[in-house]
């Protein structure tokens, strides 16, 4: 299973200043630094960005985000050296490195620098939603990202004009259907999730036995992170 961490121990070892010998730390120390770096980065970016993939996922952590995670990971590793060897000078240097790393991330958030879009393929829309989870939709509506297991319905943002049907078994020329004409991709105002709405009955009446979509998407959130309260969705 892919990791949820944005860096691993080898990333930290490569970036540590030469005077710090990573062999003086255990693998557990390095793992802790990776986890702390990922957690801090997530806490700063989470309101604006969907959680970033792990470093070995598909697609992997965006390069810019991984760089910020490395900066934090190195700072936290240096702090471990300072604590283990009671070196006040190192601790001071490490805390300054952490401050600068956090500053870089906060500048990234404020400056609204864009990240490259990611690509998704093979998504199977779930028409009608999932009533067992309270996600009810019309017969012609489906969740673009499928039936999400997340109670928060946390999703990235699709690039609407890139959505294409890549498989529509049972419907001649199904892959030639046109976005925003034969089908629409919209943000559902109630569920706070992206939906696929079909104008072609065959896509959802059982004629098509294998429907799949491909599209580009962005980590940038459409709105603030949604949360579920008492069975209803509200914005965090």
Image (spheres, rainbow, N blue to C red):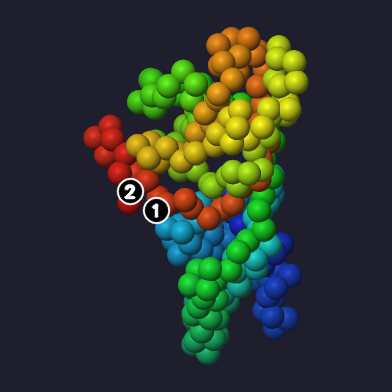
Farthest bottom residue? 89
- Check whether the beta carbons of the residues at disc 1 and disc 2 lie within 8 A of each other: yes
Tell me: 132 left or right of 96. Answer: left
Q: Secondary structure at mark 1?
A: loop
Q: Across the whole image, how many numbered discs are drawn on residues?
A: 2
Tell me: 213 left or right of 195. Answer: right
The residue at 54%/86% (across/down) is: 93
Q: Is residue 43 visible?
A: yes
Q: Position of residue 32 (x, y in %)?
A: 54, 60
For mark 1, does the 10 Å Cα neighbourhood hold few (<14), some (14 to 19), or many (20 or more) residues? some
Q: Position of residue 146 (x, y in %)?
A: 54, 29
The residue at 64%/38% (across/down) is: 163
Q: Is residue 144 visible?
A: no
Farthest left residue? 230
Task: Name the residue carrying label 2.
Answer: 235
In the depicted structure, whether residue 181 falls above or below residue 77 = above
Q: Position of residue 170 (x, y in %)?
A: 71, 12
Q: Secondary structure at mark 2?
A: strand
The residue at 48%/72% (across/down) is: 110
Task: Name the residue carrying label 1.
Answer: 224
The residue at 55%/24% (across/down) is: 199
Image quadrant holding the N terminus, namely: top right
Q: CA distance from mark 1 to mark 2?
A: 6 Å
For mark 2, does the 10 Å Cα neighbourhood hold few (<14), some (14 to 19), or many (20 or more) residues? few
Numbered badge on residue 11? none
The mark that comes first in sequence, 1 or 2, is 1
Of the pair 59 and 122, the residue shown nearer to us: 122
Of the pair 41 and 80, the residue shown nearer to us: 41
In the depicted structure, whether residue 155 falls above or below residue 141 = below
Of the pair 188 and 79, the residue shown nearer to us: 188
Quadrant of res 71: bottom right
């Amino acid at each position: 299973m892919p990791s949820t961490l944005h860096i691993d121990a080898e990333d930290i070892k490569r970036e540590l200043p030469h005077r710090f010998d990573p062999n003086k730390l255990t693998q557990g120390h390095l793992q802790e630094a990776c986890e702390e770096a990922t957690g801090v980065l997530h806490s700063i970016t989470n309101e604006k960005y969907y959680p970033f993939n792990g470093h070995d996922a598909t697609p992997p952590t965006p390069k810019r985000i991984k760089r910020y995670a490395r900066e934090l990971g190195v700072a936290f590793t240096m702090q471990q050296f300072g604590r283990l060897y009671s070196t006040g000078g190192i601790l001071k240097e490490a805390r300054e490195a952490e401050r600068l790393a956090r500053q870089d991330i906060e500048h990234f958030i404020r400056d609204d620098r864009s990240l490259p879009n990611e690509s998704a393929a093979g998504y199977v829309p779930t028409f009608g939603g999932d009533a067992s989870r309270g996600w009810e939709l019309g017969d012609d509506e489906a969740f673009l990202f499928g039936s999400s297991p997340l109670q928060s319905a946390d999703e990235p943002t699709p690039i609407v004009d890139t959505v294409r049907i890549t498989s529509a078994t049972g419907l001649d020329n199904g892959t030639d259907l046109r976005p925003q004409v034969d089908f629409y991709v919209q943000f559902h105002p109630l569920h706070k999730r992206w939906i696929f709405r079909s104008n072609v009955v065959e896509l959802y009446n059982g004629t098509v036995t294998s429907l799949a979509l491909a599209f580009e998407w962005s980590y940038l959130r459409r709105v603030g992170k949604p949360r579920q309260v008492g069975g209803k969705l509200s914005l965090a």
